[in-house]
């Protein structure tokens, strides 16, 4: 029996719906989502095991969600783009995702250019088709895209409403070569739980704050102790300025309390125990331009420093 497998990179400009697609295909929340650009800062693996069906071979698809492709001069922006390049390296297939409601722009052209340079087959995914009132617009749209590149497939989907995803999975599997099972069958990501907890905290900061605050925030876990019934977590929310700290704390600490309570509930769902969550807000002026701090935020690097191979933990 043949087994198809490979690494598949999800590529697109900020807000196209990459992380929503990753979560929808894997069926678990692996990546945080927000309407704000630059929500995803690291590459995120999501592993899908496809059982054999009548018309379909069995296989394993290793999806890689990436930060939105953008041009930025900060250390954080450069790090995000290096995450994109790492994801592109050695992948068998690229899923380039665009917002079907948005006009093709320079940003999309920049993304396509990256995909072309990678020299890897590209599927074009027209996402957010739930927002297209007039579905007859799809065919001309597809025809238009066909003039841009020899896409291996063009697939209309709605990542949010989970439309077109079975067709997409079947096409992806077919496009992948015969290969091994890269990850054990019960593993769905390579992210350590403590990093996912930090991301969930950041997601609630993104939901609760506006303007420059979401972009100025990063979260580091300082303590993560698991026992059968209770997980104790202490985390620091870093921001860049006094004003941001004041917003994050809120009047009488109300904002931080709100973020903490909602994040705790999400983390409890993920770890399956009660969670005791302590949050602190600290200022680290200009951290986005600090290469060393940006590197410190990278969990793959943190694991390397502790020593040993980056061990995969289940979520
Ligand atoms: N209506 C609609 N919204 C979507 C769809 N996919 C993603 N979104 C929304 O688009 C925004 C950005 O999504 P996200 O997955 O974080 O985008 P990313 O930056 O490409 O990872 C969020 O508000 C999502 O809810 C879709 O298929 N339909
Ligand atoms: Mg994302």
Image (spheres, rainbow, N blue to C red):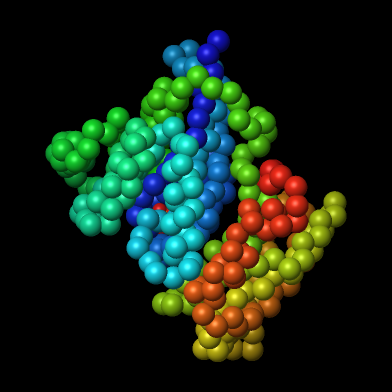
83 shown above or below 178: below
Q: Residue furthest top?
A: 1
Quadrant where the image shows the N terminus: top right
Name the residue at 52% across, 88% down: 243
> Would you say residue 289 is visible in this rendering?
yes
Residue 224, how many percent across, how many down? 77, 61
206 shown above or below 168: below
> Would you say residue 268 is visible in this rendering?
no
* Viewer-proximal residue among 277 and 64: 64
Name the residue at 54% across, 69% down: 291
Q: Going by the image, does 276 lie left or right of 299? A: right
152 shown above or below 213: above
Residue 218, how many percent across, how many down? 57, 70
Q: Quadrant of residue 268?
A: bottom right
Q: Going by the image, does 256 lie left or right of 173? A: right
Name the residue at 60% across, 83% down: 283
Residue 30, how many percent across, how many down? 57, 49
70 shown above or below 158: below
Name the residue at 22% across, 56% down: 105
- State how many labels appear: 0
* Viewer-proximal residue among 259 and 176: 176
Residue 159, how many percent across, how many down? 40, 44
Q: Quadrant of residue 14?
A: bottom left
């Amino acid at each position: 029996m043949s087994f198809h497998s490979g690494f598949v990179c999800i590529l697109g400009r900020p807000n196209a719906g990459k992380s929503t697609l990753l979560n929808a295909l894997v069926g678990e929340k692996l990546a945080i989502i927000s309407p704000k650009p630059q929500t995803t800062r690291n590459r995120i693996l999501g592993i899908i095991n496809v059982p054999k069906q009548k018309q379909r071979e069995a296989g394993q698809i290793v999806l890689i969600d990436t930060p939105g492709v953008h041009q930025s001069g900060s250390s954080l922006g450069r790090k995000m783009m290096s995450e994109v390049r790492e994801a592109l390296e050695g992948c068998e297939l690229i899923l380039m995702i665009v917002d079907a409601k948005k006009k093709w722009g320079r940003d999309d052209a920049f993304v396509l250019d990256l995909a072309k340079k990678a020299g890897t087959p590209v599927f074009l995914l027209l996402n957010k088709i739930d927002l297209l009132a007039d579905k007859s617009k799809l065919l001309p749209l597809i025809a238009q895209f066909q003039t841009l590149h020899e896409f291996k497939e063009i697939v209309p989907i709605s990542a949010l409403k989970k439309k077109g995803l079975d067709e997409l999975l079947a096409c992806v599997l077919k496009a992948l070569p015969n290969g091994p099972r890269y990850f054990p069958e019960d593993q769905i990501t390579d992210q350590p739980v403590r990093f996912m907890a930090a991301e969930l905290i950041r997601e609630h900061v993104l939901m609760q704050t506006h303007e420059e605050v979401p972009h100025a925030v990063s979260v580091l876990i300082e303590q993560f102790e698991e026992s059968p019934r209770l997980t104790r977590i202490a985390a620091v929310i870093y921001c860049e300025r006094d004003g941001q700290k004041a917003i994050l704390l809120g009047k009488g600490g109300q904002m931080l309390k709100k973020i903490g309570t909602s994040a705790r509930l999400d983390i409890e769902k993920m770890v399956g125990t009660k969670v005791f969550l302590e949050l602190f807000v600290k200022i680290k002026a200009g951290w986005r331009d600090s290469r060393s701090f940006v590197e410190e935020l990278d969990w793959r690097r943190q694991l390397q420093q502790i020593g040993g191979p980056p061990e995969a933990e289940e979520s």
